Amino acid sequence: MPEILFVCTGNTCRSPMAEFLFNKLSREKNMAHWQAKSVGLAAIPGNGISSHALTVLREEAIDSATHRSRILARENIEKAALVLTMTESHKNLILAHYPEHREKIYTLKEFAAREADRAELEDLDILDPFGLGEEVYRATRDEIKEAVESLLGNLPHFENEAGNLMKRENNITRGDTVRIAIGSDHAGYDMKMEIIQFLEEAGYEYKDMGTDGSQSVDYPDYGYKVAKAVADKEFDRGILICGTGIGMCITANKVKGIRAALCHDVFSAKATRNHNDSNVLTLGARVIGIGLALEIVKTWLGEEFDGGRHQNRIDKISGIEGGE
């Protein structure tokens, strides 16, 4: 179930109004497979919704008395399909902390507008009613409701575009499907299974080359199997996971034709595809969490080799490998 995350400051006024309005309207429009949640950038966890917000939502036949405020956490950003803020300043603060997720972070008004009209928007902020009277809360509710209705109208297009991108983000220019060999030792097993779930959902062709559980095994056995399959062109790329990613990287790079890269950040994942034409990615399950690991995998699979001056350097690496 895809999730929209609404964000304001204290998570007691605007973002919970957006959450409850969205969930009601999505059910009415037969789009209940989308689920909204809300958080605050400076929320005090456990606070209830503002009394005025409670009142104006009841006028919409919505009972929000169960709401309890939550503060924004990384896992909220990673889980959400869309992050929609109440103001531009909220958006900019989130982007400053989570720049790798910029493709899904908008203000509510920005995303609700038609794509062609977004550049023309002068005011991206939802009116803040905090500390003001019930009439201001009512005006804010109506502003949010109008934006949410437009948002729901835009979601089918977003789903289609996001689906197409996910199905083919593994290769923007070639149009074919990247075939992936994936393997791990016992330390990387759980992370491997999470990555496999992503590969299945994204439509990648893959083969799990072991290990098959958490019982202790030797990482070179699985590192070699994946690297050899890539070197023999049975698969286009390989993904290997162990405790640190180091052992798998060393193992894979012993196989002729393999350019394995250990990446624990998105920038390196992009650079190693663009500049090094890496064909095996290694990850450390004891070093990074699954959220970051998935962002690295998505980035690495979605990038292409730049060629040009970088090809000359790859040729030199191949020469060293061949003993020239």
Image (spheres, helix red, strand yellow):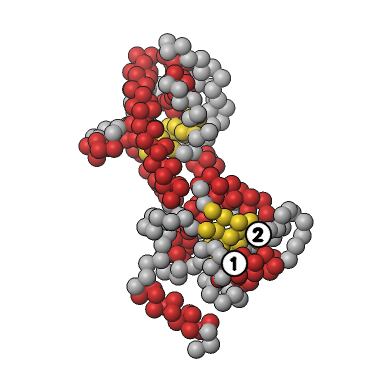
Dot 2 amino acid type: Met
Tell me whether circle 2 and circle 1 mark residues in contact (CB < 8 Å). yes
Q: Residue at x 73, y 53 (%)?
A: 213
| Label 2: which secondary element | loop
Side (left or right) of 290 relative to 37: right
In the picture of the structure, the residue carrying the numbered disc 2 is: 209
Side (left or right) of 174 relative to 249: left
Q: Position of residue 136 (x, y in %)?
A: 34, 18
Q: Tell me which numbered mark, 2 or 1, is placed earlier along the sequence.
A: 2
In the picture of the structure, the residue carrying the numbered disc 1 is: 229
How many angstroms separate mark 2 from mark 1 (CA)?
10 Å
**Which of the numbered marks, if any, corresponds to residue 245?**
none
Decide: is 274 above or below 91: below
Can residue 324 be seen?
A: yes
Q: Residue at x 56, y 65 (%)?
A: 234
Decide: is 317 above or below 300: below
Decide: is 116 above or below 149: below
Closer to us: 43 or 186: 186
Residue at the bottom extreme? Answer: 324
Label 1, residues with CA under 10 Å away: few <14, some 14-19, many ≥20? some
Side (left or right) of 305 relative to 204: left
